Image (tube, grey):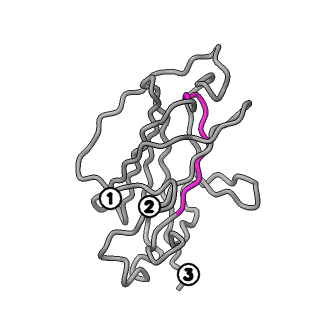
Amino acid sequence: MRAGSMVPIAWLMALFACSGTEDLPPCEGGGTPSALIGEDADGEFLAWEDGDSLVLSDDGGSTLGFWFDYRLTGLDATLPVTVVLRLSFDGGSSNDYLAQANLSCQDPGPARYTAFAALPAEYQSAPEGLDGTSAGVDTVFTDGRGVSADVVVDLVVDTGT
């Protein structure tokens, strides 16, 4: 399994938010907690907005799903963080993914994280049925101090068909 892959969960996890610590260096949680989701294209981060395309890909093997790149501030990247990603199609029930992850961070930041979320089993053999549908993505990162940052975006699935 590729680093950054997330494991589906069947239970919900309560996460609590609080503000960052302003006097710490950025990679140790300084600044205001925030999260951006997008893609890293040729070394340049492009943040996604509602209505942007979510392109179907694979995990480097035979599993289909979506790659997500994140930029994070205000979280302590020196210890593992908890990542909860919720992915839903056309407003239906969500597919939940959970990971304990290490963020990549070099001062002055921001911290970086990349994740792959596999399509649910029912779409693996016929993903074209998702083409053009709405994909709600809600991701929450919580560091070891209990500080959280989240990002929510509504994208449009592009299966390339």
Q: Which amino acid does label 3 sit on?
A: Gly
57 relative to 119 in the view: left or right: right
Q: Which amino acid does label 2 sit on?
A: Ala
Distance from Cα at disc 3 to Cα at disc 1: 22 Å
Residue at 43%, 71% (x, y): give it: 133
Let me know if residue 50 is in the magenta part. no
Name the residue at the left extreme.
11
Could you tell me residue 18's position as x and y percent? 45, 22
Which residue is labeled 2 in the image?
Answer: 117
Residue at 33%, 69% (x, y): give it: 120
139 relative to 24 in the view: left or right: left
| Between discs 1 and 2, the one toward the N terminus | 1
Which residue is labeled 1 in the image?
Answer: 95
Between circles 1 and 2, the one closer to the viewer is 2
Let me know if residue 68 is in the magenta part. yes
Q: Give the range drawn in magenta.
A: 67-76
Q: What residue type is labelled 1?
A: Asn
Decide: marks 3, 1 in contact (CB < 8 A)?
no
Pointer 1: residues within 10 angstroms few (<14), some, or many (20+)? some
Could you tell me residue 44's position as x and y percent? 75, 54
Answer above or below: position of 15 versus 134.
above
* Figure quadrant of residue 20: top right
Which residue is labeled 3 in the image?
Answer: 160
Decide: marks 1, 2 in contact (CB < 8 A)?
yes
